[in-house]
Image: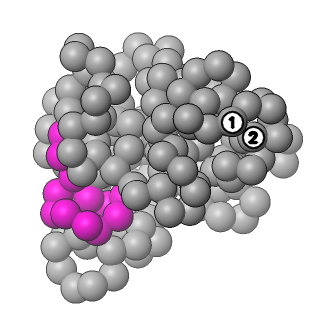
């Protein structure tokens, strides 16, 4: 198995309240923290997906523009699937500042040929911190290009029903890893956003 990894950085930061990529936590902007987290699992390749090529992207990391435009995270996943050369896609959203490389390594260790891993934290599926097999690409493409429901919920339900991902219950003690709250990040670090 070859793991391709993508940092999903295409959002407009409406929920986060500021430019989430530049938000500083524990002395590092989120883009750097998240790339470090993904790099720690030594992926086959590392990509950044966004609406436009971000100025902070290191030159050795590939860029894939979100496609089709303005359809939320599913656009970033579709772009990453079209560009990746691995057997699985490890997706991580830029606005999950508490995610750790140890947790991501545990996801990788549970990955099987033709099957990914989808965490469930606090009773909610976490599709933006998950691993998908390459075989899931067609489902994401179809959902991004047909109809008007571009949420990840329908795609995730279909992937589970087809056995392309296994669900992983996140222990309560680790559920904070999936928090995307800017106020929680600010309280945790005592830092201010850029």
Q: Is residue 71 magenta?
A: yes
Residue 26: quarter of image: top right
Q: CA distance from mark 1 to mark 2?
A: 6 Å
In the displayed structure, 83 sits above or below 180; it is: above
Tell me the residue that label 2 is attached to: 186
Q: Position of residue 131 (x, y in %)?
A: 43, 42
Give the quadrant of residue 90: top left
Q: Looking at the rendering, in which quadrant would you find the C terminus?
A: top right
- Image point (16%, 73%), residue name: 145
* CB contact under 8 Å: marks 1 and 2: yes
The quarter of the image holding the N terminus is top left
Q: Position of residue 166 (x, y in %)?
A: 52, 51
Q: Is residue 60 left or right of residue 29?
A: left
* Residue at 77% from the left image edge and 47% from the top image edge: 184
Q: State the residue in front, 178 or 166.
A: 178
Kindly identify the residue that appears in the image at 80 percent across and 32 percent down: 190
1 or 2: tag closer to the N-terminus: 2
Magenta region, residue range: 64-75
Dot 1 falls on a residue whose secondary structure is: loop
Q: Which mark is residue 192?
A: 1
- In the image, 74 versus 2, the foreground residue is 74
Q: Residue at x 28, y 46 (%)?
A: 50
Q: Where in the figure is residue 130, as x and y percent of width and height?
A: 48, 45
Name the element at disc 2. helix
């Amino acid at each position: 198995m070859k793991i391709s990894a993508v940092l999903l950085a295409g959002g407009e930061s409406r929920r986060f309240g500021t430019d989430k990529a530049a938000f500083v936590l524990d002395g590092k902007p989120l883009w750097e923290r998240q790339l470090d987290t993904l790099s720690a699992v030594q992926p086959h390749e590392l990509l950044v997906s966004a609406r436009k090529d971000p100025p902070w992207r290191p030159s050795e990391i590939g860029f894939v523009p979100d496609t089709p435009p303005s359809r939320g995270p599913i656009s970033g996943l579709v772009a990453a699937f079209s560009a990746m050369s691995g057997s699985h896609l490890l997706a991580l959203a830029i606005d999950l500042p508490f995610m750790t490389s140890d947790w991501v390594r545990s996801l990788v260790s549970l990955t099987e040929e033709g099957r990914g891993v989808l965490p469930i934290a606090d009773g909610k599926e976490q599709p933006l911190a998950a691993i998908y097999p390459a075989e899931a690409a067609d489902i994401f493409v179809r959902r991004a290009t047909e109809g008007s429901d571009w949420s990840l919920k329908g795609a995730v339900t279909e992937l589970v029903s087809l056995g392309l991902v296994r669900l992983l219950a996140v222990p309560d003690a680790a559920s904070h890893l999936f928090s995307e709250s800017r106020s929680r990040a600010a309280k945790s670090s005592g830092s201010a956003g850029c």
